[in-house]
Image (cartoon, rainbow, N blue to C red):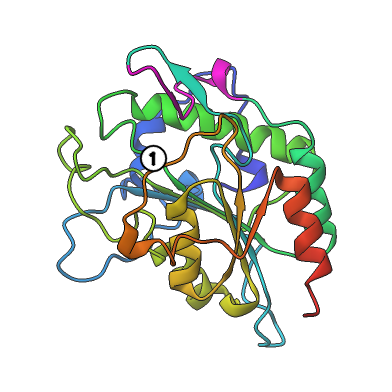
Amino acid sequence: MGSGEIENPGKGSAGADASLRGDESRSGSEAGLEHLAVPAGSQHRSYLVSQNPEFRRASDGQPRPAVFLDRDGVINPTVLNPATGRMESPLSTADFSFFDGVLESLSILRDEGFPLILVSNQPNYALGKATLNGLSAIHQKFVYELVRSGIAFARFCYCLHHPRGVTPGYSGLCVCRKPSPWFLLRARDDFGYSLRDSWMIGDRPTDTQCGKAAGARTIRIEPEHGASDPVNPARALAARPDHSVRDLAEAVDIILTRRSV
């Protein structure tokens, strides 16, 4: 959503469910959304693409690199879900906070001219763990703090599906859930980014697989609690990142160092 449309995260958001669905009853300017087209035959349209209208394809037509970022475990800590005993995505605004130094690192990328795009799997609604209002409130708090720091993302992309979900319309296979590179490919087509010069930063093997499938360079932030998703041995090579780091600050150092390589 554009910087002029950010609501105070402490207030309830009427129509938040519609925002997360990309509900076509609201215009793009009202919802702050640009609903991307899904390939023919797909049964799913339940994803969120929040578009910053200030970002457009480069006027000179030259491809430029972008930085794609996962959210949980990269920008904010995961939190313990007592119901599952696992570290998972925040389920409330009270549980959402930024890692130390993240806003400063994002500011550096902004100042260096890198467009920033969030690409995040957020299946808690599909799994029956959260409401769309709750997910929307967390997103609003996230963007609110970015705006306060003068940081603008070109686009926020959330896949809301899960292959084993329980919520109708959000369950089953989809085109956008990482490791699918679908959101990266759409950003390339819409903005003219050079994916071979771009970076995908994440903390899970699926983030690395997503970046590599798109032809981008990859950086993995080591999981904060030392846990990791299991990797199919047949996909182990695709899940091996180009670089491994401790935090976003180290990732930014690598991007700036290798910018001209």
Residue at 29% across, 47% down: 46
Residue sitting nearer the eye, 103 or 23: 103
Magenta-colored span:
84-96
Quadrant where the image shows the C terminus: bottom right
Q: Where residue 1 appears, x then y in whole percent?
A: 56, 46
Residue at 47% across, 18% down: 80
Horizontal side, residue 226 vs residue 170: left or right: right
Above or below: residue 256 compared with residue 26 = below
Q: Is residue 44 visible?
A: yes
Above or below: residue 55 compared with residue 51 = below
Residue sitting nearer the eye, 115 or 123: 123
Q: Is residue 254 on the magenta stretch?
A: no
Above or below: residue 77 compared with residue 153 = above
Horizontal side, residue 5 vs residue 229: left or right: right
Q: What residue type is labelled 1?
A: Leu
Q: Where residue 92 appears, x then y in whole percent?
A: 48, 19
Above or below: residue 184 compared with residue 76 = below
Badge 1 crowding class, 10 Å Cα cut-off, few under 14, some 14 to 19, many 20 or more, is many
Horizontal side, residue 136 vs residue 129: left or right: right
Secondary element type, mark 1 = helix
Q: Where residue 215 appears, x then y in whole percent?
A: 51, 76
In the rendered image, the residue lying farthest to the top is 82
Residue at 78% across, 73% down: 259
Residue at 55% across, 19% down: 95
Q: Is residue 113 visible?
A: no
Residue identifier under label 1: 20
